[in-house]
Each structure stands twice: as C-alpha cells, then as structure tokens.
Image (spheres, rainbow, N blue to C red):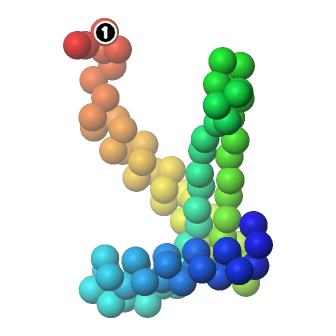
Amino acid sequence: MTAETKAEMEAAIERHFSSECDGAMLQGWMLQAFGSNVDDIEYAGIRTLREFPETQNVITTLGLAEYAKVTVADQVTEVWTGDDDEG
C-alpha cells in the first residue's frame, strides 16, 4: 500500500469513527480484509490483508484483534442455528 493511500484510508477511518461515535477521537484501529482473484476461485485461492497504524502499540492492536474475535464469534453463534440444511 502506498503511503498516500494509507494516509487517505487513515483519514477516512478517523472521519467515519467520529461520525459513528458522536465525535469520539480515534485511539486505534486495524483492518482485516479477505478476498480472492477471479482466476483463483476454482482453486480456493484466497488473499488476506492486514493494516494498522505503524505507530500503534502492540497492546492496542492485539486488544482490538481479541475484541473482534470475541464479538464476531458471539454474533455468529447468536445467528447460526447449527442446521446448514435450513432453507
């Protein structure tokens, strides 16, 4: 990722966070993205991307990752009934 693109992304994240959280100041962030190339789909080729501020301390990054892990797992288990054949 170019420095310019990362700076634009960070500014957009700050604006979005402030807008969604009643003007709160952003203290840390991380991005986890997942995708695949069209050519790789039949081979289950996947791509992942992780980004976070270079100056962010490791405790903040690990804390955000753990919080995401726990809250996403809770949301998934609330919705998922365990029956994949539902239709």
Q: Quadrant of residue 17?
A: bottom left
Query: Position of 75 compared to 27: left or right?
Result: left
Residue 39 versus residue 21: which sits nearer the camera?
A: 39
Relative depth, front residue between 69 and 18: 18
The residue singled out by tag 1 in the image is 85
**Whole-percent x and y of residue 69?**
51, 50
Residue at x 40%, y 77% (from the top left corner): 16
As drawn, which residue projects farthest toward the top?
Answer: 85
Quarter of the figure with residue 11: bottom right
* Residue 67 % position (x, y): 48, 60
Number of numbered tags placed on the structure image: 1
Could you tell me which secondary element the residue under label 1 belongs to? loop
Question: In the image, residue 41 lies at what x, y percent?
Answer: 64, 25
The reply to whether residue 1 is in sight is yes
Task: Give the quarter of the figure containing the C terminus.
Answer: top left
Q: Residue at x 67, y 36 (%)?
A: 37
- The answer to whether 86 is drawn above or below residue 39 in the figure is above
Within-10-Å neighbours for mark 1: few <14, some 14–19, many 20+: few
On screen, 8 above or below 86? Answer: below
Residue 60 is situated, as x and y percent measured from the top left of the image, at: 61, 74
33 is higher (above) or lower (below) than 10:
above
- Amino acid found under the numbered disc labelled 1: Asp
Tell me the residue at 61%/41% (across/down): 35
Residue 70 sits above or below residue 57 on the image: above
Residue under the point 31% across and 9% down: 85
Kindly give the residue lying farthest to the left in the view shown: 87
Q: Where, by quadrant of the figure, is residue 65 drawn?
A: bottom right
Is 43 left or right of 30, judged from the image as shown? right
Residue 19 vs residue 83, the one in the foreground: 19
